Amino acid sequence: MSLSCKMQIDCVKKQDQLLEVVQVLTEVNLTISKGYISSDARWFMDVFHVKEENGKKVTDQRIINCIQQAIGSKRIDPSKITTLTSKSYDTNLHGEPTAIEMTATDRPGLFSEISAALADLDCNIIEAHAWSHNSCLACVAYISDQSSNARIDSHRLSAIKQHLNTVLHASSTPENTSIQSPQHTDVKSIGLIRAGGREGTMTTVERRLHQLLLSAQDFDVPPLQQRACPPGISVGIDSNGEKKTQKTSVLIENCSEKGYSIVTVQCKDRRRLMFDTVCTLVDMQYVISHASVDSHGGYAFQEYFIRKIDGGALSSESEKLHAMKCLEAAVERRVCEGTRLELSANNRVGLLSDITRVLREKGLVVLRADLATKMDKCTVDITFYVRDIVGNNVDMELVKSMKREMGLIDLAVKNEKVVKSSPVVKPRFSIGDIFKSQIERLSHSLLTYM
């Protein structure tokens, strides 16, 4: 008996409709196991098979009502879908924090240096999210004044940005700079991602991290990490430096008779996978007209019929290659092969700086970080994905040493379960097979329905 819940969405077509729907489903922590998407003329039709994060069938009517509100004409209740900040930090009590975003060429200890710089500048870090991929770092942080918890004024913010830029540029030394390895370093202040509405979701922050890494060209693998595999194919490396099984395959071919480019993505299945690929296609200015997604034996198969925003298919091989590399990066940048560390501690000035200093001194590299201050402002939850400087997982004796050094901080190792991979099996029903023979009939049916 299937535990998935079938969800059908029919609505008037609008720009980026698929991204909006997938973002809502992702935000309420539903896993998309299968889906068929089609749009034509003025209508947009989706069928999703979804289940809860724990694998159970969706039975909570509040979740269903929330989805209906989010994709309908009504404004969503701010209490329904919120950012990690708004769920944890009372902005009515403490005021709205200042949001800043950073991109830089990554190096060991950089996140620790950023945390120390903000502590030295008397900034309280309320929430922070950082991703590192292909030697590029992207970070979105929410900060406030250390003494008053008030929003930081523009004059002081300018000084903070200047100081952070100095820290980030420290990696852009002549010996680290080359034509093949461009430097992308920037610090910006951005509007607060507010609680409530589409602007107030955790996926909005994650999409921004995708955009920052895309702008930093993390899809271009540094020369020292070049892999001997075709474009669009990603091969994993284990702790001994040996190649593992193929992880990601991205292929693009044109359907000239219909004016589409068909994008096929095959990789290990995981949560939020469809969100990552859809938001990247949208951010690259492609319009998704039809799509099919499925999973089997721990592997996912996705197929998208896309056009450029001006209405044409991808016209050149270089354009296809660029799109393939960007999609491969979108799939891989959330996947962390390192050890997951979960920490909980009483909030205090310089907490993140002290913790990341210990990680750096122990020779650990931060691949990903998520920090959130709880509602009472007394407790902070932090999740790190780390590995040692040569790419190995963390030794448990080292973890025990860190626990002793961190004192009262609660630290736990949570190695996430890895789905045993099986040969990639293309699902029986491919949207390519269906649309190549029936797209005209589908278009006629939609026009008749209108």
Image (spheres, grey):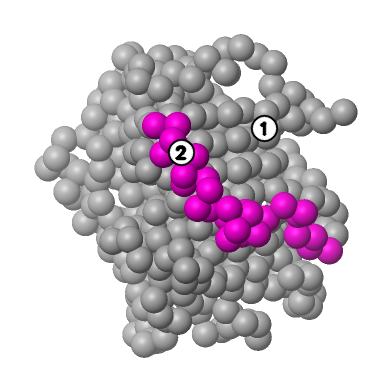
**How many numbered badges does the structure rendering display?**
2
Is residue 375 shown left or right of residue 158?
A: right
Q: Is residue 52 above or below residue 61?
A: below
Going from N to C along the chain, the mark reached first, 2 or 1, is: 1
Q: Amino acid at mark 1?
A: Val
Residue situated in front as seen by the camera: 145 or 421: 421
Disc number placed over residue 346 in the picture, else none: none
Where does residue 41 sit, x and y in percent of width and height?
Answer: 37, 43
Q: Which residue is mark 2?
A: 446
Asked whether residue 348 is in view, the answer is: no
Q: Residue furthest left?
A: 155
Describe the element under mark 1 as helix, strand or loop.
strand
Q: Is residue 182 magenta?
A: no
Query: Dividing the picture into quarters, in which one does residue 154 lie?
Result: top left
Q: Which quadrant, please, contains the C terminus?
A: top left
Query: Dividing the picture into quarters, in which one does residue 191 lie?
Result: top left
Is residue 7 shown left or right of residue 256?
A: right
Q: Amino acid at mark 2?
A: Leu
Q: Residue at x 33, y 14 (%)?
A: 93
Q: Are marks 2 and 1 in contact (CB under 8 Å)?
A: no
Give the magenta part as a residue range: 423-450
Q: Main secondary structure of the magenta part?
A: helix
Q: Which residue is mark 1?
A: 50
Where does residue 360 sit, x and y in percent of width and height?
Answer: 57, 58
Q: Residue at x 63, y 42 (%)?
A: 35
Where does residue 126 sit, x and y in percent of width and height?
Answer: 41, 32
Q: Which quadrant, please, contains the N terminus?
A: top right
Q: Nearer the viewer, mark 2 or mark 1?
A: 2
